[in-house]
Amino acid sequence: MTQQSKRKPFTGWHMTGILVAFFGVVMTVNITMATLASSSFGGTVVDNSYVASQNYNEWLRRAADQDRLGWEEQVDLDAARHIRVAVRKDDQPLTQLAVQATLSHPLGRTPARVMVFEPVGGGILRSTQAVPAGRWWLDLAVRHGDEDARYRVNLQ
């Protein structure tokens, strides 16, 4: 004689437990993802994209004018994490540069700071402050005589 095991019937309580567990997991994941997203959001790039788009052709013209200058910028960090900037034209360093620079965090977690540069010779400028560890954007405006160029450099 074989013994048959009796299966317990699938009841409404089982289905209720499955639904509560399923939606509990979904809601927990959604709340976790929403909390992480809102706590790490650094803000918008532009507040009104339509208004910003009105300047697009002007930005393209400025970029073309800057390309015609023929300047080659080199921006890096030295061992002490100071920013070094060198601008060359026709393989010759440009000297007597006026530089304005702002260092900002890509996600806006810290306030932007103005960087001050001093010449160290050979057409190289070095920041007086060190850059903290991490990823940073350097917005750089370089002027030589009547000509100027703007660069955005990703520093790490």
Image: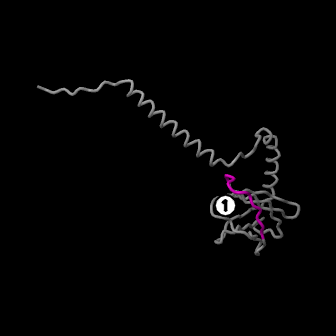
Of residues 51 and 104, which is closer to you in this image?
104
- Residue extending farthest to the bottom is 121
Side of 151 relative to 147 (left or right): left
Q: Quadrant location of the N terminus?
A: top left
Vertical placement of residue 50 versus 150, above or below: above
* Residue 25 screen position, x and y as percent: 47, 37
Vertical placement of residue 21 versus 83, above or below: above
* Residue 47 screen position, x and y as percent: 76, 43
On the image, numbered disc 1 is attached to which residue?
155
Disc 1 marks which amino acid?
Answer: Leu
Q: Does the magenta stretch include residue 118?
A: no
Q: Does the magenta stretch include residue 108?
A: yes
Q: Residue at x 71, y 45 (%)?
A: 44
Q: Residue at x 78, y 67 (%)?
A: 116
Of residues 27 and 119, which is closer to you in this image?
27
Q: Is mark 1 on a helix, strand or loop?
A: strand
Extent of the magenta region? 106-117
* Residue 145 screen position, x and y as percent: 88, 64
